[in-house]
Amino acid sequence: MKPVPADGESSLQAARVPRAAAPLAAAAPQLSVWDAVSIIVGIVVGTAVFLTPPLVFQNVAGPWEALAVWLLGGILCIFGALCYAELATAYPRNGGDYEYLSRAYGRWMGFLFSWAQLAVILTGSIGAMAYALADYGANLWPLSPGAKALVAAGAIAALSALNLLGLTVGKSAQNILTATKVLGLGGVVVAGLFWGHADVWLAADAPAKAMNMSFGLAMVFVLYAYGGWNDAAFIAAEVRNQHRNMPRALVLGLAAIAVVYLAVNAAYLGVLGFDAARESFTPAADVLQRAVGPWGGKAISVLVMISALGAINGMILAGSRVYATTGEDHRLFARLGKWNHRTVPAAAVVAQALFALGLVLAVGTARGQGTIDRALGWVSLPPLPWAKYFGGFATLVAGTAPVFWVFFLLTGVSLIVLRIKDPDRPRPFTAPLYPLTPLVFCGTCIYMLYSSLTYAGALSLIGLVPLVIGLVLYAVAGGQRPETEPYPSPSS
């Protein structure tokens, strides 16, 4: 790509939208900094805070080291947030990584990112969170495997329909769900304050009893729990006063998440003790059960379900903007680039829901898994190790994680690339301590890429499937622009 002219106009800078959609695509930004923070917290604080702490505790020597790992994870993510803050304010168009990758490496790279998100990565995360919702619902009501699939599909369909009602409805639902989950986690923290034991911290210098501990593996679980904060960049063009509020939202959102994670993990350790906490499968439920009795476990199931709903809604809201922006630039996705009178990219929301529902049936059910394995057999490939990675969607997430971290790494590098290619671009916010900031972020991505490849092994090949399909689609039609006319907008 040629350097951007001084007047700021280029094929990627001017928002290019289908003629029929142009009058509807330039809606005034409606999201406040706190709406953006709510989306970040809502997406990130899903089910991981209830599931991963014991895995972290099993790989550290004591409670203080456990908290240090969670703090370090938050600091490393803030380095990444500072990189995204510069990119989002310099190129404040919806789509986030799609826009930065397209500008840094070419339109084909942004297309591949968007296609991979739609085909399997983001929609797979939506499906996985929907199944987590159903799994915890089974703690309250008897649900057969088929009923769980219906609950997961129903959650995706209902929240997608909710977001079709307009951005105001979608963000209001997000704010309510995020506030509810934070208040619920506050209850766990209060239980830690009143039912915690000080001797847990006094004995912290004594190493925990042996296990095959790995600080690096603990960091993998922690960074997984922090994942998803970058999705806020997908809605950059809809945030008011982008040049100020996007950096604030990214940093404040991650700071809030770090505080929540530290407080909740301190509660787990304080009430259960280090040895018991590392052996617990349901630390939050165990904490509340000690504090308020048997119904504490049911309360946690409700809280996890609310957390899952918040994460699903946030991903639906933010993810649809990636495909809508892609539709403005690529004929293949042109229909997804149309916005309706409610300022919603309706076709993008529907397409995302259909892909997620397809994955629920294909990956989340025994019949779907069997169909996939039979298809693999037709090309002389072994069946997928569904049980090894804790279930269908966990298998999908593990297999696509390396591709996710490759794109994340490329976005970090794009900050450096775009400073070189586009030196005259106004940058309302610049990452402090440059180039240390992107180097730390890229180093974190490289480590996570290595760890995800080590964990998934040959399963990583399934992450290549959407990329190969995406390259074919781009070669056939992806490189063609829709019939467009330049439409200047505040995000150009």
Image (cartoon, helix red, strand yellow):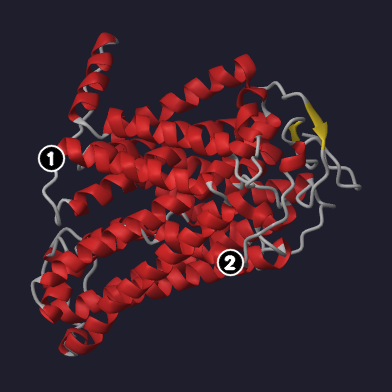
Side of 95 where 383 appears, left or right: left
* First of labels 2, 1 by sequence position: 1
List the residue tagged with mark 1. Answer: 144
Image quarter of residue 421: top right
Q: CA distance from mark 2 to mark 1?
A: 41 Å
Q: Residue furthest right?
A: 7
Q: Position of residue 119 (x, y in %)?
A: 45, 31
Name the quadrant of the N terminus.
top right
Residue found at x 74% / y 46%: 26
Question: Can see residue 159?
Answer: yes
Q: Secondary structure at mark 1?
A: loop
How many marks are shown on the rendered structure? 2
Q: Position of residue 115 (x, y in %)?
A: 53, 31
Image quarter of residue 186: bottom left
Instruction: Say above or below: 397 vs 172.
Output: above
**Contact flag, marks 2 and 1 (Cβ < 8 Å):** no
List the residue tagged with mark 2. Answer: 249
Q: Nearer the viewer, residue 63 or 175?
A: 175
Q: Nearer the viewer, residue 457 or 97?
A: 97
